[in-house]
Image (cartoon, coloured by chain):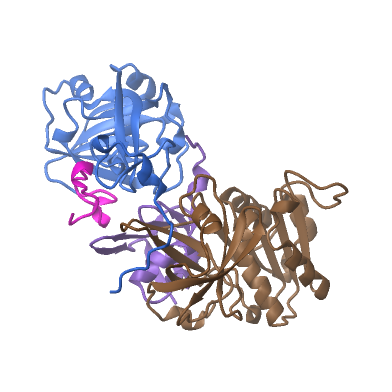
Amino acid sequence: MIKTGSSTVRRLVWQVAEVRALVQETYRVRSILLNVNGWPGHLPGQHVDLRLTADGGYQAQRSYSIASPPEDKFVTLTVEHVDNGEVSPYLVGEVRPGDQFELRGPIGGYFVWTAAMGGPLVLIAGGSGITPLMAMLRHRDRQNSPAVARLMYSSRSLEDIIYREELDTMVHRDANLCVIHALTRKQPEGWIGYRRRIDKALLAKTCFPPEERPNIFVCGPTPLVESVSSLLVELGHDPHAIRTERFGPSGGYIP
Amino acid sequence: MAEPPIARGFKSRRQEQTPKDRLPPGQYVTTDFPVLSAGPTPQIKLEDWTFAIQMDGSILGKWRWKEFEALPQTTKKTDIHCVTKWSKLDTSWQGVTFDDLLRALGLAKPPAPYVMAHCDGAYTTNIPTKDLIDGKSMIATRYDDLPIPPAHGGPARLLVPHLYFWKSGKWVRRLRFMQEEERGFWESLGYHNYGDPWKEQRYDGD
Amino acid sequence: MTDNGSDLVLDGNAAAGLLQEIFVLDVTSAQTRCEACGFTGTVGSLHLYAAPMGAVLRCTHCNGIIMRAVHTSHGHWLEMTGARYLRF
């Protein structure tokens, strides 16, 4: 059972968030750094609800994983442009520093990893599913955690890998961190890495064996999450040790 | 409570293309067909499928798939409105109207004022019988001339398009006549008992 | 028209916001036991359906409904007859 500290005993209220900075991560993914006065802190893996109010009163609400570690001052959300989306094109294309919207959180104590939980740690991401797992890795890095960690990250192409340079830097600095990329649609010249979807063979080869009882987190589109979880169970992992976050068609949003 | 900050430049895309006279209040038109289910999509084999009409303890009529397909078929073109605010215009359905089911049972009129629709996955929804008769509803088996896909309620779903679409129960198996109204799955959890989109009856208390 | 029903299921964790409007505690971290089949699991790991209308949380073992929650303009509704207990 995880103790989730201050976030368990507090009513969720809507707070004002102000955009302080923007980072273009890939051609269709942008990170938004938000200042939230009185932010109570969060645990890596938690998410927030964002609420946008248009002139005239129309409101739209979406959930986003927090990409920043608790050690950061600002709350970072990393948003992918969804074609024909209502909210993501606005967040990725229009938002500027100084803009304000409402946010509530942090939410969710189930999909959480803290350095205190230790390793080995297995993180499996599909596309923008990397976001909550990045909060975990950034936290691990800031805490100088000795937990051995492996990230398996499936993206369509090299250009679609979010946080690519930061992940490379972390790996070069930390012998206990290993990142395996799978590029499923397009690979650059000379690519010697995986070029297929994460399958049983890849998991068997790169995941820690069940006897080592790793903490496993899987996040991304529902089909990937379901496929990876059942394969891990087939490989002998305890289902209770596998925590999943399916992103769903609109990012897992409940109005 | 303070006014929420306006998100500069944020606009609802949905409000831009609304033919106002066809849309109930608060709805927007969609060209896709969102799927919403209270549980996993049941995998139903046609050879095992049955549909029944029941009152009190008795089964008034029961049909297997081939028998059901042999009943009079009606095609209906209609708009549908989901309580989650999307509306889809000019949808085309084919199936057996409630009126033809009553005729098949030899009933000149409905034997009770209310119906509970029972569906696979333990889903239920309640409708007054007067909202099912006179061509207002059917047990639909085809959408756009093709068998309804499982995710959209196939092989057969209830269709009551003048009410919010949660009343058009997917994977319907049984209609049970009731003398007194009981509330179904969503109606017993805060949603409106009747659900008229033109009066925006989304929630209990509206 | 989508035929893919499997896209509809989310993890109970995605219901945390809605449930925390009702419970001050984070229910998604709690352990629960399915009334129908006895299977135990964390609320956050349950299968979540019907997200745009509310939350229908189902047992990952037998698919029985453990908990349902709705937030309407008139208040919150919660039904938990499928949960033998919640343990925080």
- Measured as percent of width and height from the top left, residue A217 is found at 63, 64
Quick check: C11 left or right of B50? right
Q: Is residue C63 visible?
A: yes
- Residue pushed farthest right? A190
Q: Which residue occupies the foreground of this view, B185 or A39?
A: A39
Quarter that holds the C terminus of chain B: bottom left
Residue B202 magenta-drawn? yes
- Measured as percent of width and height from the top left, residue B136 is found at 21, 29
- Residue B137 against residue B84 in the figure, above or below: above
Quarter that holds the N terminus of chain B: bottom left
- Residue C19 against residue A141 in the figure, above or below: above
Quick check: A9 left or right of B160? right
Can you tell which chain is drawn blue? B
Q: Which residue occupies the foreground of this view, A68 or A208?
A: A68
**What count of labels does the image hold?**
0
- Measured as percent of width and height from the top left, residue B105 is found at 19, 23
Which color has been applied to chain C in this rendered view? Answer: purple
Residue A238 magenta-drawn? no
Quick check: B129 left or right of B91? left
Quick check: B156 left or right of B188? right
Residue numbers of the magenta segment: B183-206
Which color has been applied to chain A in this rendered view? Answer: brown
Q: Which residue occupies the foreground of this view, B73 or C15?
A: C15
Q: Is residue A241 visible?
A: no
Q: Quadrant of residue C75?
A: bottom left
Would you say the magenta stretch is mainly helix, strand or loop? loop
Q: Quadrant of residue A204?
A: bottom right
- Measured as percent of width and height from the top left, residue B176 is found at 22, 38
